Image (cartoon, grey):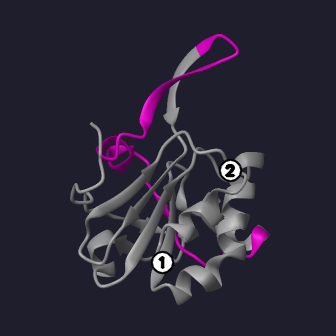
């Protein structure tokens, strides 16, 4: 499935690191930066999360929330958040249904081995729940700044 700008953002309710459930549609009226990442506490994912954290005051000032999502379990999210002082929610998609709905669960090849995993991707969702911008195959360096620049 391919999600394009102008498409409604697939809604979901998933377990968050807070111990509560997080429902995407509960953020209507605010912009949402929804980013999918492969795995907690790995070099690229850590750099991406820390970049979003460093820019969090700017995102908040632009009436936007940042939400990270991976297939890691909630306990791993809690450790990851605590280790790096992340102040935005991380949600767990253990069965991959939300990853599939957003088209980020893809076949990958690493060192000649083929497997399925999360393609690092970010979706900018407007106040009405419509996808406004999509970044796929994200390169971490400078990505948070690009997303912030496109919020306006």
Residue under pointer 1: 65
- Above or below, comparing residue 87 to residue 91 in the picture: below
State whether residue 85 appears in this view. yes
Q: At x 55% / y 44%, what residue is drawn?
A: 120
Task: Classify 10 Å Cα crowding around label 1: few (below 14), some (14-19), many (20 and above).
Answer: some
Q: Earlier in the sequence, mark 2 or mark 1?
A: 1
- Near-viewer residue (87 or 9): 9
Q: Is residue 89 left or right of residue 76?
A: left
Q: At x 51% / y 38%, what residue is drawn?
A: 119
On whether residue 8 falls in the magenta region, the answer is: no
**Disc 1, SS:** strand
Kindly check if marks 2 and 1 are in contact, taking CB atoms under 8 A apart as contact: no
State whether residue 80 appears in this view. no
- Near-viewer residue (74 or 2): 2
- Near-viewer residue (52 or 152): 152
Residue under pointer 2: 140
Q: Is residue 1 left or right of residue 61?
A: left
Residue 9, percent from left and from top? 27, 59
Magenta residues, start to end:
84-113
Name the image quarter holding the N terminus.
Answer: top left
Instruction: State how many labels appear.
Output: 2
Quarter-of-image position of residue 57? bottom right
**Disc 2, SS:** loop
Quarter-of-image position of residue 20? bottom left
């Amino acid at each position: 499935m391919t999600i394009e700008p102008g498409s409604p953002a697939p809604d979901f309710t998933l377990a968050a690191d807070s111990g509560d459930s997080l429902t995407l549609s509960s953020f209507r009226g605010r912009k949402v930066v929804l980013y999918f990442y492969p795995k907690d506490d790995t070099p690229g994912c850590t750099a991406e999360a820390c970049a979003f954290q460093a820019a969090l005051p700017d995102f908040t000032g632009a009436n936007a929330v940042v939400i990270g999502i991976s297939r890691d379990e909630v306990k791993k999210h809690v450790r990851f958040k605590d280790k790096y002082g992340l102040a935005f929610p991380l949600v767990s998609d253990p069965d991959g249904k939300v990853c599939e709905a957003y088209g980020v669960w893809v076949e990958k090849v690493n060192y000649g081995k083929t497997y399925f995993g999360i393609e690092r991707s970010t979706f900018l969702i407007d106040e009405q729940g419509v996808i406004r911008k999509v970044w796929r195959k994200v390169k971490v360096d400078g990505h948070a700044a690009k997303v912030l620049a496109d919020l306006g």
